[in-house]
Image (cartoon, rainbow, N blue to C red):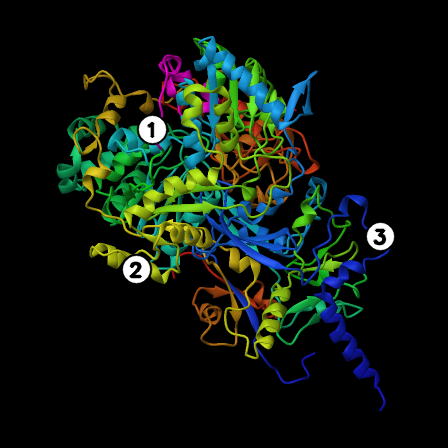
Amino acid sequence: MTLRRRDFLKAMQTAAAAAAFSPLLTSCRGPDRPRSRVATAVPPPRGAPESWVVSTCGACPGGCGIRARLVAGRLVGIAGNPLHPVNRGGLCPLGISGAHAVYHPDRIRGPLRRSGGELRPTSWDEALSTLTARLRDLRQRGLSHTVALLDGTRGLSRDVAARFLGAYGSPNHLGGRPWNDVTATEAMRAMQGVETGAAYDLENARFILAFGSGWLEGAWSPVGAARAYGIARRGRKSGRVQVVQVEPRLSVSAAHADEWVPIQPGTDGVLALGLMHMVLREGLENRQFLDQWGFGFDWLRALVLRDYHPDAVSERTGVSVANIIRLARQFASTRPAVAVGDDRNGPGVQSVESGMAIHALNAVVGAVNSPGGVLTPPGVPLDPLPAFGSDERGARGRAAPPLGGGRADGPSALQAWLEGAGSYPVNLLVAYGSDPLAMLGGGERARVALRKVPFVVSFSAFLDDTARLADLVLPDHAWLERWQDDPTFTSRGFPVLGLRQPVLKPRHDTRHAAEVLAEVGRGVGGPVAEALPWRDFQEVMKLSARGIHRSGRGALFDVPEAEAWVETMERNGWRATNFGSFEEFWAGATARGGWWDPVYDFGERRRVLRTPSGKIDFGPLARSLDPRGTRKEPASAMARAPAAPSGYPLKLHLYPLLFAFGDDQGPLPLVQDLLGRELQESWSLWVEIGQSDARALGLEDGARVKVESEEGAVEARLKVYAGVQPGVAAMPVGPGGAPGQAWRRAMPGQAAALVGPRHGPTGSASAAGDAWVRIRRA
Amino acid sequence: MNERPKAGPRWGMAIDLDRCTACQACSTACQMENNIPPPTPEAAAQRRAIRWMDLVPYLEGEFPRVKLRLLPRPCMHCDNPPCIKVCPVGATVKGQDGIVAQVYPRCIGCRYCTTACPYTVRYFNWYEPSWPGDLGQALNPDVSVRPKGVVEKCTFCHHRLQKARDLAAAEKRELGPGEYNTACAEACPTQAIVFGDLDDPHSEVARMTRSPRAFRLLEDLGTEPKVIYLREGEA
């Protein structure tokens, strides 16, 4: 038999095509052999034992379900858990690259202690005894209230910290998530008396009016919101949703909306009240709803009709009168419509006042606690942890005035306190799942403020900004290496408990932060030891999950088709649980990712409205618009345009970078590479201004510039962007980052330094909307 | 390659821009799945970063009438691919299932194909692939790491097809619908990306290609792309 040339070539081609996809190729690299730093970049052998572990993502508070792929003990991929109701198999860049968080070069390999100005490795025993001795000493001297803890954790980790501080005797359990995750939550608390925050039923809304920061970039659950968006656009029978985005800048969310309405930064609340004015004037409000559910609306109505005339609102917000009238009519006449005011991960462009105004706008058209409106998610029926005792020292410490008057934006409150606003010193600061220095922009000013604390402890798993400055570092596991509960809710208001189980064994000499805190508590002794008897976090999780099992409600995660079944059964008074004994429940919940209850009861008025009147209280909003209650004062601060300080002509607008608000896993190179792709900018901090402003300043695209405010200054690249209003300078804010690895040299976090600690009235976070800057060539 | 009678499916992708939120989960999922090294800032600045699935922005107009369009863009796996015609060494081939593949050991790095591709989806390896610290531990064992000096591109996660086929063969059955999916489509939070057999009239992807919103990129060039986009907005 002869082999013809043609056959030979054909065979070669087939062989080559097969070789192209074969892992064997790793062994036939060219003469340019990999250098030592890529020696690890060899995949595990093909055919090695492979397994998938179900868990819950910990990269941000969104609470998506994941499946992790392990080959030969190595974590080689993460995909979404199709059974998880929050994400149903989808995932965002942070979760997908979660394996990089585990193998991150900035991981801390063991406890560190500062000696001779340097952080040096130490043993766990020594590190813990140092901390315990300090805490015991402060408590004995009656200074327990000078211990502050910034908490960026969730679920029971947060409860453990609360118990620790409560028994120890400190009122300073501060919020330590990036930015002020307060706006919508505070508005709901003021007007409905609930703590849960808002669930926007985007899946069922026909008209979405989104205010402020991009809700597609950084919603309460980015993947959850994106999924709801996909369904509302093209995945339902009731037609395609209309989206109007009100924002100072053409963001990714604005680009996807049907209409972008540019607005002056920080005036979202004014526009909401202007729209309410038109709704009321044209008689388009839902009177029946307001009569039945509203309390104190007459006062608000009088104020809004008097002060928020479209002409005045247009002047203040920059939105044309015609647009105000049209949007008001569209919002009031499309059912169901919802105004989204949530920017809890955004950089605080909305004050609590704005949040209340937006919530009130929803209430005026009856979009509260109704399908397609703002829902109040019921909590997960967890068992509370057993009550704990106290002693006199603890009670005295707890009674001290909390630092910053209990402001929810912990890092900023702390900075303001340390810069002189405080009435007592902070002797010990604990960063617990939190990187306050990065959140404050990581600049010299914030650094100087934090250095005033004589002893800083960080629980970070990564050598982040705060850890670099700390006196003691007690590294936590990476999120894929630890147990954690993750109570959350879907956009339809269904309560969800995601369970995070360790996907792989801890790679370094790290310990679970909550377990360490409990151990320190036992070392301090007395009531603190009694409050924290647990040695194993999983034990705590099981203890609290017994409540779900006993309630007999809901079901373990299941395929989407099972949702209607569970809902129908429960609505008719049956149980639809797919578990028996508690052990079965626990095993099933760990294997499938968790539990949920796909029923929202629109009739639970008493659960949803916990105000004294049992109705939606418009009083707090009216009071803030008319503080003296005279009804004759000129319009409140919100309606008056703040004057630019001389020399700072541009209004600063900070916006969240796509999905990058999470601060739980250090900056990942792949994520860093995709930030700013929509502008073809990445890898450095940039500032955006419009063409006319750039011309006036004589600056060209790409110039190195210095951005200065009264609070601070940063260097950046100038980006001339047609999607920014004249008179506005827009800057991205992501997780901060000090110079470190090659690929994390310039994380765009420093822009926060321009805002300063935002000295606002208690509970307010309005000042971010009031920062002014100037730009000049560097 | 197309001498034998056509057997099996014709794989293609549909991307519904009305669902897409430009979150770039597709992009990251692709990079993790296919062992694409993260670029250094310098490489990114020189536009040498490798992103098989990239987000491409189109900005039009001046304030306030500005439109920003964001397009996730993989290889189009053209039925009439210009890249194959220019390759002097036959390193680029179209398989029977319509997937345009790159044969790395054959590639001489001349980059004719990167120039010929009107969609600019072919990437040259300017550097030795490297992962900072231990990040290389997370490499996918199913995909080879490409050496410096060769061109690479989206493979429609061909290794997943091989795996699915192997499994089906081992179980002595046909490859079922949904058994083979790309990493980008799997990760998409909004299900904007759908992958499947374009020749199966009942598949979701084929249904989407029949939508009045459907269009293909640079259709007039005659490349016959197998990635179909669905326009955003009402229709």
Q: Position of residue A524 (x, y in %)?
A: 49, 20
Q: Position of residue A307 (x, y in %)?
A: 24, 26
Callout 2, which amino acid?
Ala
Depth order, front residue of B92/A86: A86
Instruction: Tell me, yes or no, whether the highlighted magenta stretch contains residue A406.
Output: yes
Which-is-in-front pick, marks 3 and 2? 2
Depth order, front residue of A681/A596: A596
Q: Which mark is residue A564?
A: 2
Callout 1, which amino acid?
Ala
Position of residue A508 in the picture relative to residue A347 (left or right): right
Depth order, front residue of A671/A309: A671
In the rendered structure, are the residues bearing label 1 and label 3 in contact, judged by CB atoms less than 8 Å apart?
Answer: no
Which-is-in-front pick, marks 1 and 2? 1
Position of residue B130 in the picture relative to residue A99 (left or right): right
Depth order, front residue of A65/A1: A65
Q: Which residue in the structure is indicated by mark 1?
A: A387
Label 1's element?
Answer: loop
Up the image or down, B189 lies above or below A716; here it is below
Q: What segment is highlighted magenta in the picture?
A: A386-413
Q: Which residue in the structure is indicated by mark 3?
A: A32
Q: Residue at x 47, y 23 (%)?
A: A149
> Mark 1 and mark 3: span between their CA atoms?
65 Å
Label 2's element?
Answer: helix
Picture quadrant where residue A340 is located: top left
Work out which quarter of the rendered image holds the C terminus of chain A and state it. Answer: top right
Up the image or down, A303 lies above or below A35; here it is above
